[in-house]
Amino acid sequence: MRRIRAAAVGAVTVSLVLTAAACGGGSSGTEGSNEQPKTLTYWASNQGANLEVDKKVLQPELDKFEKETGIKVKLEVVPWSDLLNRILTATTSGQGPDVLNIGNTWSASLQSSGALLPWDAKNFEAIGGKDRFVESALGSTGAKGQDPAAVPLYSMAYALYYNKKMFAEAGIDKPPATWAELAETGKKLSKDGKWGLGAEGSNLSNNIHQVFVLGKQHGADFFTPDGKADFTSDGAVAAVKQYVDLMAKDKIIAPGNAEYAQNQSLSDFAKDKTAMVLWQTASATFKAQGMKDDEWGVAPAPVQSGEPGQGKAANSMVAGINMAVFKNTKNIDGAKKFVKFMTSDEEQVILNKAYGSIPPVKAAQQDPAFDTPALAVLKDTLVTSATALPQVPEESQFETVFGTAVKELFADAAAGRPVTTDSVRARLEKAQQQMPRK
């Protein structure tokens, strides 16, 4: 999954969702009518450089679906800054879409609300079978031992993207492989109004993704085996401090990045203002920003030492977008037909190629379009060194409160306030206190 959600509303609404009887979605149709409506409402997540790019990618495919089935799909592309709160509000109000995209890390949280259609064997059969999907993608569709709450749509992993022109001008001949090398390389690039690394300090999801990986590298799990929040371990504190110190101590991230929340770091990268970004499947965004494929390179995201792998050498979370259906939609059959269409082999190639992501559908993944050097790094990362975020009901609240703590620490760094082990631990203690008690 990608990017951000607003903190305060999210934290409150999550608790409401987990205690309220979910009403579900389904905004189309006529009350009291047994006839299923011919219109579906679809909330798509912002995958492209901007909302207009997504509309240009998706609308021709939705028109194709309407021609094939007679079902019109009303599209709304929702920014990541709004998406989770919009979904949570819909689960309590009943005023929502029929079909929607969700970040795959939210699956267990939204599953616990009871609002989403469970993808049991019968429902999977309606879209061609569960075995069409790769195992790693299915691993982030809900809590273990339960029917998935969603179906994989796009698969992603984090990597280090670097600007070849800026590297050449600085006399740097290869991308950094460790965090120490990244800091050293970044310092060589941070001069004359340009910066070594881009970040999105107000992007709560991205904050969590980066810190989660660093946490694994420091031996932190963030939750105890019985599901209690564990945000203040030495490993968790070290991970957050190391990430924020890229701005506060190493000074390779521009202070203004503390306010970035929605792809601004990618825009800076494309404009030769920033030499490196840690992002997931960014190639389509670079292209939309006017960059040519030979102007940037991609390498595995850094580790503490050695090479990427499992355990403490993990260098990405298992990223991706899932497609879900509100179970109280007035057109359940039409919604399943739409999911089947969007996850068909043909559409998986079209959509994932457009977004620079990797199909979670096995047959589509074999298309030559996904054998490019950039995607080869991502596919290898997903197989060998990516780790799924905790599949716990409180995961979305974890992202909100913990991501906000990191955001606040970036604000401190940008303002020149000290970022110390004690100040980091205090922020994380505050975040932990906002989590449900077990």
Image (cartoon, helix red, strand yellow):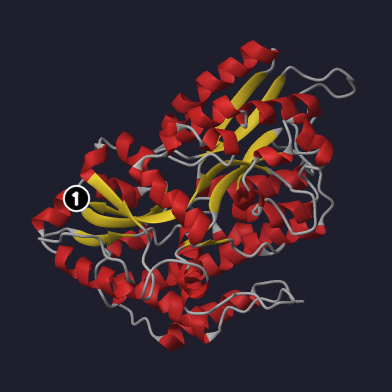
Image coordinates of residue 5 in percent, x first then y, are: 54, 54
268 over 303 or under it: above or below: above
Q: Is residue 91 visible?
A: yes
For the point 71% across and 56% down, the residue is 108
For the point 23% across and 55% down, the residue is 274
User: From the image, which quarter does the C terminus lie in?
Assistant: bottom right
For the point 63% across and 31% down, the residue is 42
Count the marks: 1
40 over 292 or under it: above or below: above
Q: Name the one closer to the observer, 338 or 311.
A: 311
Q: Name the one closer to the observer, 418 or 146.
A: 146
For the point 51% across and 86% down, the residue is 234
Q: Is residue 260 left or right of residue 196?
A: right
Q: Quadrant of residue 327?
A: top right
Image coordinates of residue 128 in percent, x first then y, are: 72, 31
Q: Is residue 97 visible?
A: no
Image coordinates of residue 123 in percent, x first then y, are: 80, 36
Residue farthest bottom in this picture:
422
373 over 257 or under it: above or below: above
The residue carrying pointer 1 sits among few (fewer than 14), some (14 to 19) or many (20 or more) residues within 10 Å by Cα, namely many
Q: Quadrant of residue 324?
A: top right
Q: Name the one closer to the observer, 328 or 418.
A: 328
For label 1, the residue is 164
Instruction: Identify the secondary structure beneath mark 1.
Output: helix
Circle 1: residue type: Lys
Image coordinates of residue 366 in percent, x first then y, are: 51, 35
